[in-house]
Image (tube, rainbow, N blue to C red):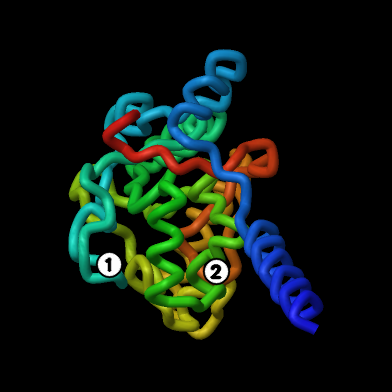
């Protein structure tokens, strides 16, 4: 009887570990990332401000001005995979013809930060589930808005960045006409250059082809 009980406990323990293993996605470490980009240079993370002169940064997670109310990044920097940055460069060039430009709130996000977000706010409408990881963790998602290059001020948008309001949805209609116009301008230009809007967040755009890129957990300080 004792043997049966021990065997049953062992079975439950193995099942527990197997289930947990299945819940953990494959995330590349800093060492694995460095090895990968030696043979796949298109997968390298590029610093956006160095690749696109004149682009503005407002990295909210390097400050306390975010839903976590604390700094999640040690450095106010923004990175994305090389093809993603090329797409942003085209968006910036097109906006510049209208006297406008991009302001980046967030881009590549280390996987450990996504885990911390989910512990605080497990709402998958606005925060990625670590079991799947985020497209930010792949270096293939950008949070941004549009500014007037002459004044440096942001165009009127439906909500501030990181709002959990239903007005943040990329197709929400009960808004002032100028906010809808500005949101649709951003959406149309981003879509033209290879990005798709997230339904729940007007500021969030995923790079088409994100599936080709692995989840990463490389801190900014190492890039």
Identify the residue under disc 2: 170
How far is disc 2 from disc 1 in space, using C-alphas?
20 Å
Q: Going from the N terminus, do you reach mark 2 or mark 1 first?
A: 1
Residue 26 at x, y percent in the picture: 62, 46
* Left or right, residue 13 beside residue 147: right
**Callout 1: SS:** loop
Residue 177 at x, y percent in the picture: 45, 75
Q: What residue appears at the point 42 percent right and 72 percent down from the top-left corner? A: 119
Q: What residue appears at the point 49 percent right and 65 percent down from the top-left corner? A: 202
Q: Quadrant of residue 165?
A: bottom left
Q: Quadrant of residue 27?
A: top right
Q: Which of the two residues, 76 or 33, is positioned nearer the viewer here? A: 33
Identify the residue under disc 1: 66
**Residue closest to the far top:** 38
Q: What residue appears at the point 45 percent right and 69 percent down from the top-left corner? A: 118
Q: Quadrant of residue 42?
A: top right
Q: Dot 2: within a 10 Å radius of its alpha carbon, few (fewer than 14), some, or many (20 or more) residues?
A: many
Depth check, mark 2 against mark 1: the one in front is 1
**Callout 2: SS:** loop
Q: Dot 1: within a 10 Å radius of its alpha carbon, few (fewer than 14), some, or many (20 or more) residues?
A: some
> Above or below — where is 32 with respect to 1?
above
Residue 8 at x, y percent in the picture: 77, 76
> Above or below — where is 173 with respect to 100?
below
């Amino acid at each position: 009887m004792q043997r049966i009980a021990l065997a049953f406990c062992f079975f439950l323990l193995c099942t527990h570990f197997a289930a947990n293993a299945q819940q953990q996605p494959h995330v590349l470490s800093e060492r694995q990332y460095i090895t990968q980009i030696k043979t796949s240079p298109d997968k390298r993370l590029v610093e956006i401000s160095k690749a696109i002169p004149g682009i503005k940064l407002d990295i909210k997670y390097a400050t306390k001005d975010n839903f976590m109310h604390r700094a999640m990044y040690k450095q106010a920097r923004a990175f994305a995979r090389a093809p993603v940055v090329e797409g942003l460069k085209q968006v910036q060039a097109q906006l510049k013809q209208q006297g406008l430009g991009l302001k980046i709130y967030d881009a590549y996000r280390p996987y450990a930060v996504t885990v911390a977000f989910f512990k605080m706010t497990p709402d998958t409408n606005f925060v990625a589930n670590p079991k799947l990881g985020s497209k930010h963790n792949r270096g293939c998602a950008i949070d941004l808005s549009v500014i007037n290059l002459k004044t440096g001020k942001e165009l009127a948008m439906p909500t501030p960045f990181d709002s959990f309001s239903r007005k943040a949805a990329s197709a929400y209609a009960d808004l002032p006409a100028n906010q809808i116009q500005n949101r649709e301008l951003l959406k149309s230009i981003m879509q033209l250059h290879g990005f798709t809007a997230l339904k729940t967040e007007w500021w969030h755009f995923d790079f088409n082809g994100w599936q080709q890129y692995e989840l990463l957990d490389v801190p900014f300080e190492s890039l």
